Image: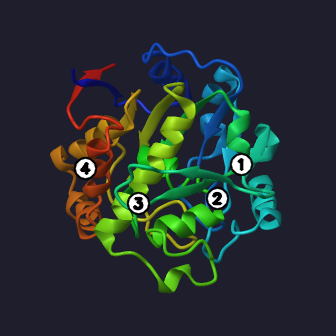
Amino acid sequence: MKSKVYFTKTITPEKVIEMYEMLGKPLTGKVAAKVHSGEDGNQNFLRPEFWRPVIDKVGATVVECNTAYDGARNSTEKHKKLMKKHGWTGCFEVDLMDAEGPDLKVEIPNGKVLKENFLGKNIVNYDSMIVLAHFKGHPAGGYGGALKQLSIGCASTAGKCVIHSAGYTDDQSIVWSHMAPQDTFCEAMADAAGTVIEQFKGNIVYVNIMCNLSVDCDCCAVAEDPCMKDIGILSSLDPVALDQACLDLIYASDDPGRAHFLERVESKHGVHTIEAAAELGYGSREYEMIEV
């Protein structure tokens, strides 16, 4: 059976709520809202005011994890300051899931690359999750969407190092000199995404916003401005189908910036993360698009 992916060209905070409700999957218990807090200096990330209606709707706590590269988010102290500067703590209860150790170590018995992953330990405090992703390009993964929010996004600093190095190290002081080959890195992201999917056992939904379509991620302090016009909002219970549908919309676009965006995706074999996640059984690349 093909996965259902809902799509609308209308991008408003209120429409995000509708796209969540289309999924027919009410989130229960203590809910986590995984967002991208935005690197200091980044102009493209989606602000807390945009996400506020849907986060308030589900009664969620905003969750994030620290990064593994130099910047304003690679320590708890700095990240908390930036969350305040960017307005997150003014709008929501915020939880840096790896603010204090130890991390949650998760075994991956059937991974393509990784044998283990490290998640922000506070993830165990939540019963369900809404993954709110800004779909855009990415300098390492080619693109960033739902699968990246699950993998890199929910990994602790140590987990991010493990993913980027394909299990070589969990040490941020050496990880960048031991980067994995590109396809191996994509497979490690798929392995890591699966650990979060397994953690929530189906109590998880996904929303991708296709706007501010830069080739650079919201983790870039100096990011290119968007090269394509906004496309819309997509939602699904299947992160593989959701990210595939977003890429398919890019390929189908007649926007003159399409070639530049796709050069970033294709140069980093971005689709391989989707391929690997599908092969691991975390979703399907076959989907039914339902326009709202």
Earlier in the chain: of badge 1 and badge 3, it is 1
**Based on the displayed image, in which of its 4 quarters is residue 185 positioned?**
bottom left
Element carrying mark 1: helix
Q: Residues within 10 Å of mark 4 (few under 14, many from 20)?
A: some
Cβ atoms under marks 4 and 2 closer than 8 Å: no
User: What's under tag 3, amino acid-wise?
Assistant: Ala
Q: CA distance from mark 2 to mark 3?
A: 15 Å
Q: Residues within 10 Å of mark 1 (few under 14, many from 20)?
A: many
Q: CA distance from mark 1 to mark 4?
A: 28 Å
Left or right placement of residue 36 versus residue 286 in this view: right
Q: CA distance from mark 1 to mark 3?
A: 20 Å
Q: CA distance from mark 4 to mark 3?
A: 12 Å
Cβ atoms under marks 1 and 3 closer than 8 Å: no
Earlier in the chain: of badge 1 and badge 4, it is 1
Element carrying mark 2: loop
Label of residue 121 in the image: 1
User: What's under tag 4, amino acid-wise?
Assistant: Glu
- On the image, numbered disc 4 is attached to which residue? 275
Earlier in the chain: of badge 2 and badge 1, it is 1
- On the image, numbered disc 2 is attached to which residue? 156
**Based on the displayed image, in which of its 4 quarters is residue 157 positioned?**
bottom right
Q: CA distance from mark 4 to mark 2?
A: 24 Å
Quadrant in which the C terminus is drawn: top left
Q: Residue at x 28, y 22 (%)?
A: 291
Q: Residue at x 63, y 66 (%)?
A: 158
Front residue of 63/280: it is 280
Cβ atoms under marks 2 and 1 closer than 8 Å: yes
